[in-house]
Each structure stands twice: as C-alpha cells, then as structure tokens.
Amino acid sequence: MRKKKQFTVCRACGSEVELSGTVLCCKECGAKQLYPRDAEEETKGHYADAFRYMCHDDFYSALRLFEAISKTGDNAAAHFGIFVAKYGLGADREHITGNIIHSCKRRNTADVMEDADLQKALQLADKAERAAIKEVADFIYEEQRRLEREEREAAAKAKNALTEDGLAVEFDTAQKNAEEKAKREKAEADRIAEEARAEEKRRYDERNRRIEKAKKQERTAKIAKIAVPAALLAVVLVLVSVFAVVPAIRYSSAVKSYESGDYAAAADIFRDLGDHKRSEDYLGTIPFYGLEAGDVIEFGDYYRSNAVVKFPIEWVVLEADDESVLLISKYVLEVKKYNEEHISVTWETSDLREYLNGEFYEAAFDASDREQIIESEISNPNNTSQGTLGGNATVDRVFALSFEEAEKYLIGKEYAYGYPTDYVKALGVYEDEEGGTGRCWYWLRSPGSSQSNAAKMEYDGTVSYRGSMIHYSKYGVRPAIRVRVEKVGTLID
C-alpha cells in the first residue's frame, strides 16, 4: 500500500511543506527548516505550532516552544529552531510583485557564528542538515550586518540633519559646552560655600547636643529610681490587657453580633481572634461573611503535594457583597488542555468547561460545599482585538475567568500570577524557567486569535489576547467559583 503523504507548515510563508526527510524546503518561498526523524504525534503538533508562530512573527512564543521541545528530545531540529527564532528569521510578500522577501526581524548584537544553539545544532546534525544549517546561518550573518549598517547610517543621518555643512551644529555645540562649563564652575563654587556653612552649623549643633546630653543624664538618674518599678508594672498590665482582657472583650462583642444576626461584623472579629475560645466554631457557620477583595479563605479539598492526599483549597476573594463572593484558587490546581481536539470551539463546547463542572467539581467539593456554590450565569464576550466570537452565554458552577474579568480583578495584583502546586509541577506544567520566577501560564475562557486558540495569563501577570492552541497539554487551570453568603448549619455545643 502506498504511504500517505504528511505535511507541516512553512515557517516563513505558512504554505504546506511535505515531510520528506529531515531537511524541508518550501516550494513556495524556498525557506529551509529542520524536522526530527520519527517524531511522535504530539511532537509533530509542537513543531507545527512553532512554525506557525514564526510565520506570524510571534518569535517569542516560537522560541519558548522550541526550548520546551529541546528538553524532551535533544536533536538538531530543536536547536536550529531556537537559533532562527532568536534572530526573527521570517518573510514578507511584496504587495506589487507578490515576491517573498526573506529577512531577519530581530536585531541581535551577539556573534551569530558563535551562537550556542547553532553550534549544538551543527554538532547533532548529519551531513545534509549541516549544509542547510550553514546556509541559513550565513544568510542570518549577512542580514545582521545589513541591519547594523542601517543603524549606523540612520544615526549619521540624524546627526547631520540639522544643517547641510554642519557649521551651525558645530557653533551650537561650542556655545552649549561653554554654557555648561560656566554652570559647572558656579555650581562648584556654591557647593564649596554650602559645605562651609554646613560644617559650621554641624559644629554648633554638636556642642549644644553634648551640653543637652549631660543635662539629660543628670535628670534621668534622678527619675530612674522611681520610674523603673512603675514601668515594669505598666508592662505587665499591658500584656495582660493584650493577651487576656482585649481578646475576651472582642470575643464577647463578636458573640453578641452573631446572636443579633450581624454576621459580617462577627466574622470579621472571629477571623482576627483565630483559635481564641470557640471563634473557629462560630466562623465555620458563617464562612463567607465579612470578606473583602484580596482575602484568602479555605473551601473544599484538592491535591497539593501529590495525587494521593488532598488538602484544603485556598481561594482569593475577587469580589464580595451581601449575597455572594467571587473566588479564584490561590494556586494553579490542575494541568489540562482547553480542548482535546484542535478544532474551532467556544467556552460552551470546550472540554475544559465539561471537566471543571464535572470531574473537578465532584472531586473538590463534598455535598455541603456544593450547596453553597452558585450556578452562575457566565457571559462569553467576543475578542474584539482579534476579531474572534466568544459564543453563547453559559450557566456554570466552576469556570475560568474571561479576559475582561482578568483585567478587572487581577491585573496589577500580586495574585494575578499563576503559581503551580507540587502536584501540578509533577504533571509537567510549563514554568518560567528562564526568568526563574516559578510561575506558569494558565487558561482564560475567552477565545484567542481564533476559535482554535484560547486566551491565557502570561508569566508576568498580563493577558495574552492571541492566546495559545487549545490542544496544548501543559497549561495550568485556576478555577473560579461564586458562593452564597449565608449562615450554614448551627453551632454544635
């Protein structure tokens, strides 16, 4: 049986390129790129995504993806991908002729031929691959020299743009230098005079200080015999007040507020008191009262250290009123694809929505917890910056934030960053290894540059409106829920 042809994407023009060998050459534009032998299906998808990023001039995303690929399998194709992404090797089509022009879109002052990834690619390559790598490297070298010349010419042009013969510039420069010299000399004279005045004042103040110190020591010696015992007594009284009297008074006030139905005031005090008397028992019946944005509260249980033992989930309060509280998990709790297949979907039809409202909902919350979680009406706005439709509104118990909600509640806050648990790290989530921040990407529910992409939160706590391919398997999930503000159960004696 005849073997079916397979294709990937040209890194320069986006045309289909047949997978025939490890050195691929686009018939449309002539761009060359490397491809690994016997790649698995997931790896093939990663290479195709990286080539698409380069085609759309998103060289940063391509670079990070090639780096991730190189960690799973050290080969010439991955290091060559890192190398060309560093220098922004791309192409543009002329509007008039339709010709494709290759160029470097990133200026890099490093020595091209000494690049570590270039050397690694050459080391791992076979004869045909080395020839292709050297050809591309020579082109990048010439492009960097061209960019350098253009920078020098632009600088020289700007320097001589004021006049044709340069005489006016020379005169203005000399005049400016003379004025600056005069200013410096005056400033130096003023500085010397000011230092002299300051030194005279310092000596005067030091003399007065020594006199005053001697007088004070004399007064202190007289007072100490009486004051020390009184001070010790005052300290004892303060400690008794802080650790016994004041907490008792506040506890009594909180109980009265609780019994009168002012649960918000009661909850605020019970939280401050911690384990004082029965504060935690009272608070257990009114857990969501008295909260403000930025507060952290425990609710439900999920895996943290491993996939065996569950721990209480910590949630950050995003918004609170008299009826409900909007929460987002403090940490990234899971690693999931937005959708299993790389097709056009919306939040309504995504696998991530089904997982959060099904498997995760059942695993993280017991029956009493579920009674407090509200079925929220979720809007799914269009991504106007990318021209992508968001789809129908949904009703969900658990959901990811939209990019609008991320902008409203997270941007500029410390809790905008995605920090993975040890459990999530073990699942292989993409971490910011280059920056060393320990942060990871996590999904938003809004669409990205198309309905086969989804928006995400970057390592730096900003929204990526272009997003990433929905079938990426190494992105994190920070669930959000809305819970009722109401008294639950009664205090058990």
Image (cartoon, grey):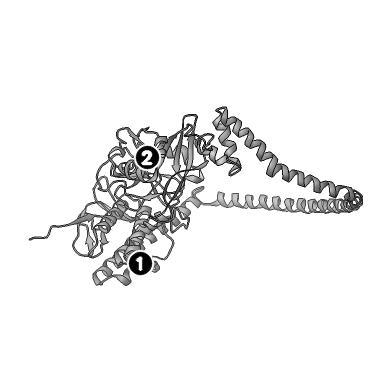
Question: Observer-nearest residue: 254 or 89?
Answer: 254
Numbered circle sitting on residue 399: 2
Q: Is residue 308 positioned above or below 387 on the image? A: below
Q: Residue 50 occupies which quadrant of the picture? A: bottom left
Displayed quadrant of residue 138: bottom left
Q: Which residue is mark 1?
A: 118
**How far across and down, in percent of the image, does residue 261 sit?**
55, 28
Quadrant of the image containing the N terminus: bottom left
- The secondary structure type at the circle numbered 2 is strand
Kindly state the secondary structure of the residue where label 1 is placed.
helix
The one nearer the camera, 261 or 65, is 261
Spot occupied by residue 45 in the image (x, y as percentages of width and height): 26, 55
Residue type at mark 1? Leu
Residue 72 in view, yes or no: yes
In x, y percent, where is residue 341? 25, 48
Extreme-top residue of the structure: 260
Crowding at dot 2, Cα within 10 Å, few <14 / some 14-19 / many 20+, comes out as many
Q: In this rendering, would 182 be left or right of 382?
A: right
For this view, does 86 lie left or right of residue 102? Answer: right
Residue 18, percent from left and from top: 18, 58
Q: Examine the rendered structure and indicate whether residue 298 appears above or below residue 67.
A: above
